[in-house]
Structure formats: structure tokens, C-alpha cells
Amino acid sequence: MKIPALSAEEESALQRLGYGRLWIDGGVLSRVSLLDQVRELESEHGDPHLEHYRYATLVSFLDGRSVLSDDDVSTILQLGELDPDHRFDPPSPTP
């Protein structure tokens, strides 16, 4: 399946949040969610810890599946290797 090219806005959002193209190509992150996350980041209550957005995206992806395919596992492992922070930190609990 051929993934359509990203818009300039989507490319900018990927970079801003520390995502690579694999997040979208691998089906882990949707374009709608990506743009929603940028809007949240820019809001008054945005989380300055960008890894929290990536972690939440991964958790949402995993929660939506009862079984992972070999491709899903491969994608997740690649995402971990390519992550700018080399880890996925969960967000801190809010008081």
C-alpha cells in the first residue's frame, strides 16, 4: 500500500514532536492525531516533554490491538531504536 506524501504542515509536526516518518508509515500514528498533538503542544496546557506524546501514541496503538503482527513488532522495535531519546518515558502523574 502506497502512503500518500505528507503535507508541509505534517512534515513540520513530525519534526516538532520528534517523530520519524515510520510512525505514520507503520500505522502507529495517524495524520489527524499528529496534528491534534501539535495543537495540544501549542496550547496553554501543552506538555513540554515531547517523549510523552510519542509514548502516549505507542500505548494507544498497543491498546487498540489484541494481537500484534510480525510487522507491528518490527515497527515498534525500529521506533524504539530510532527514538530521539532512545526510550519511551511515561508521562508523570498529575496531582
Image (cartoon, rainbow, N blue to C red):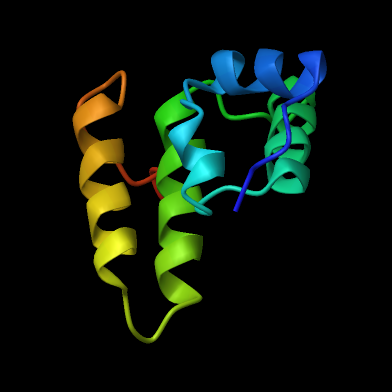
Residue at 48%, 63% in the rendered image: 61
Above or below — where is 31 with respect to 76? above
Above or below — where is 57 with respect to 65? above
Above or below — where is 59 with respect to 49? below
Q: Position of residue 89 (x, y in %)?
A: 29, 39
Q: How many marks?
A: 0
Residue at 78%, 46% in the rendered image: 32
Instruction: Give left or right: position of 35 versus 83.
Output: right
Instruction: Give left or right: position of 9 versus 15.
Output: right
The residue sitting at the bottom extreme is 66
Q: Quadrant of residue 91?
A: top left
The residue sitting at the front extreme is 1
Is residue 88 visible to the viewer in this orientation of the structure?
no
Residue at 31%, 38% in the rendered image: 79
Q: Position of residue 56 (x, y in %)?
A: 48, 50
Is residue 27 visible to the viewer in this orientation of the structure?
yes
Q: Position of residue 21 (x, y in %)?
A: 51, 29
Q: Nearer the viewer, residue 25 or 57?
A: 25
Q: Nearer the viewer, residue 25 or 66?
A: 25
Instruction: Give left or right: position of 25 versus 32.
Output: left
Instruction: Give left or right: position of 13 versus 60.
Output: right
